[in-house]
Every structure is written in C-alpha cells, then in structure tokens.
Image (cartoon, helix red, strand yellow):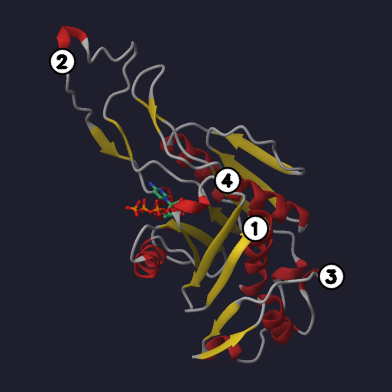
C-alpha cells in the first residue's frame, strides 16, 4: 500500500481525468492511503453523470418509557443534515429520515420525521428500495424500554428509592437494510462513534453492517460545529479530515459517491 498526502479530489482527477463537478474548490490536504487496487487504471466514469437517489438518516432516536419520558442520546443531527444539503447541492434526489431535532430542512430535500429506532427502520425500508446510496448518520438508540407505559411511570409510589427499567434491543437498522452484505450497485456509508480502539471497532462494524465506508469520529463531535474524522473503506482506503466544519466534511463525504462506480 502506498502513502501520500493529497485530497481525494486529486485522486479522482487521476482516475477520471477531471475534477468532480468541474469546479475548483480549495481543499485542505488530507492523508490518503491508496491500496494497489485503487491506483489501477480507471474504469469508465458513470455515477458522476447520474442523478442518484441518496438516503440520509440523521439525529438521535427517542425511545419512550411513558408519554413524557424517554431514552435518547446527544446527537444534534447536524452532520446528517449537512450531508443531505451537500447531496442536494450536488444535484442528487435526497430523502432525509430525521430523528427528533429542531433543524431546518435543507433546500430541495424530502424529509421524513421519525421518533424511535423502529420508526426510523420503517421509514428507511420504504425509501431504500429506490435508493442508490445511504448515509447512516443517525445515532440510533440501541435499547428501548420493554414496555411503553400508557400513563406516567410511577416508580416512586410506595416510597421506593431504587428501581430498574427493563430494556430490549432495538433492531440494527443498517444491518437489516443491507442484510450484512455490500451491494456493488449501491454506496453505503456508516458512522462509528468510538471512545477507544476506534479503528478496529469501526472496521468490524463496516464489515458486519455491509457498508462500503465508515466514518469514525469521537464524542467531541456530537454537539460541535467542527469535527475530525477518519474515513475507512471496505477496500482499505483511508482518509483523514482534521478539525473541519461539518459542512466541509459533508461535502467530502458526498464526493465518495463518485469513487464507487
Ligand atoms: N446503527 C444502526 N442501528 C442501530 C445502531 C447503529 O443502523 N441499532 C448504525 C449507525 O447509524 C451507524 C452504525 O450503525 O451508522 C454504527 O453505529 P454505532 O452506534 O457506532 O454502533 P453499534 O452497532 O450501535 O455498536 P456500539 O454502540 O455497541 O459501539
């Protein structure tokens, strides 16, 4: 495997003879590791000229205990919304499936609002049939309360000072959609938020969930405007984007669509 410092834009220019979109955008250099297979002669460009149906999930899911209480996480939804915006700007048809977040719908994007992981799975399943690509940026809650109570949870009744909540596993949305297999006709980008042993865990998720790429980030990214990510591919490519606005990272992630013909 070779190592060089160059933006994917230059990498692609080498493969396809022109910059995507034909526009010159200042791009900070990023580390790119290029396996032999990718430096092989270019195949005919195809996707670049097609309007793709891009599916994006964003935000947290909310798993209700009762009508007023729920389990959730810190996801702001910003990364997914930026990807949806960038994909629409690139001319693609975009469906955004969003968990509960108070963000404006990007221009030209069809948005489906959902609450729980199971709602999100149902909405994505419907749109997945006609999709060419999926960015699974949502922070799906892995667990939900075993029962959603119709009235308020009265755990304090009788003076209890401790209690327990039974949880059941939510479906793995991405693995359900892909069946754990990559499909050469589609591009699937997963996300992994890790607190330790990130690359190993992210690579395992990439394989398990049938994704083509996985975007590795850390909890610091959750509410931040800027982020640092490592983008790993099933074909052993690796890009690093350091301390960049989420909007800029989103644009680079949408450019991944051009790498997969
Ligand atoms: N994901 C999913 N369905 C779930 C959990 C996660 O589709 N029930 C997706 C996320 O949207 C993300 C990828 O899988 O694209 C990895 O999510 P992450 O939460 O990092 O991984 P988990 O499989 O939940 O593993 P863990 O939280 O134990 O690290």
Circle 3 sits in a helix, a strand or a loop, which is it?
A: loop
- Which numbered disc, 3 or 4, marks the residue that appears first in the sequence? 3
Looking at the rendered image, the disc whose residue lies closer to the viewer, 3 or 2, is: 2
Residue 8: where, in percent of width, then height?
66, 76
Q: CA distance from mark 3 to mark 4?
A: 31 Å
Real-space Cα distance between discs 2 and 1? 48 Å
Crowding near the residue tagged with mark 3, few <14, some 14–19, many ≥20 C-alpha atoms within 10 Å: few
Q: Earlier in the sequence, mark 1 or mark 3?
A: 3
Residue 188: give x, y in percent of width and height. 53, 61
What residue sits 64% from the left and 66% below the top?
257
Marked residue nearer the N-terminal end (2 or 1): 2
Question: Badge 2 local density, few (<14 within 10 Å), some, or many (20+)?
Answer: few
**Decide: marks 1, 3 in contact (CB < 8 A)?**
no
Q: Is residue 183 left or right of residue 53?
A: left
Front residue of this view, candidates 234 and 70:
70
* CB atoms of marks 3 and 4 within 8 Å: no
Q: Is residue 87 left or right of residue 178?
A: right
**For residue 195, above or below residue 146:** below
- Quadrant of res 48: bottom right
Q: Name the residue tied to disc 4.
A: 127
Closest to the observer: 219 or 117?
219
Q: Are marks 3 and 2 in contact (CB under 8 Å)?
A: no
The outermost residue toward the top is 158
Q: Is residue 3 above or below residue 157?
A: below
> Looking at the rendered structure, which numbered label has been put on residue 23?
3
Numbered disc 1: secondary structure: helix
The circle drawn on residue 250 is 1
Q: Secondary structure at mark 4?
A: helix
State which tag comes first along the sequence, 1 or 4. Answer: 4
Q: Which residue is mark 2?
A: 160
């Amino acid at each position: 495997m070779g190592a060089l410092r160059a933006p994917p834009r230059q990498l692609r220019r080498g493969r396809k003879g022109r910059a995507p979109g034909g526009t010159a955008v200042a791009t900070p250099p990023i580390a790119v590791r290029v396996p032999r297979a990718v430096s092989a002669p270019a195949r005919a460009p195809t996707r670049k000229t097609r309007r793709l149906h891009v599916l994006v999930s964003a935000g947290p899911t909310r798993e209700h205990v009762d009508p007023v209480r729920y389990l959730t996480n810190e996801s702001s939804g910003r990364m997914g919304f930026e990807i949806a915006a960038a994909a629409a700007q690139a001319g693609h048809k975009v469906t955004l499936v969003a968990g509960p977040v108070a963000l404006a719908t990007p221009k030209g994007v069809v948005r489906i609002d959902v609450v729980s992981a199971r709602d999100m799975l149902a909405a994505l399943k419907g749109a997945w049939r006609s999709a060419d690509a999926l960015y699974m940026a949502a922070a799906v809650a892995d667990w939900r309360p075993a029962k959603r109570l119709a009235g308020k949870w009265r755990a304090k009744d009788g003076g209890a000072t401790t209690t327990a909540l039974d949880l059941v596993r939510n479906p793995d949305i991405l693995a359900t959609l892909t069946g754990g297999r990559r499909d050469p006709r589609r591009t699937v980008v997963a996300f992994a938020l890790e607190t330790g042993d990130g690359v190993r865990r992210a690579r395992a998720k990439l394989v398990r969930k049938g994704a083509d790429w996985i975007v590795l980030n850390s909890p610091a990214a959750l509410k931040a405007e800027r982020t640092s990510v490592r983008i790993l591919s099933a074909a052993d490519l690796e890009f690093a984007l350091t301390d960049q606005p989420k909007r800029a990272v989103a644009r680079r992630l949408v450019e991944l669509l051009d790498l997969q013909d």
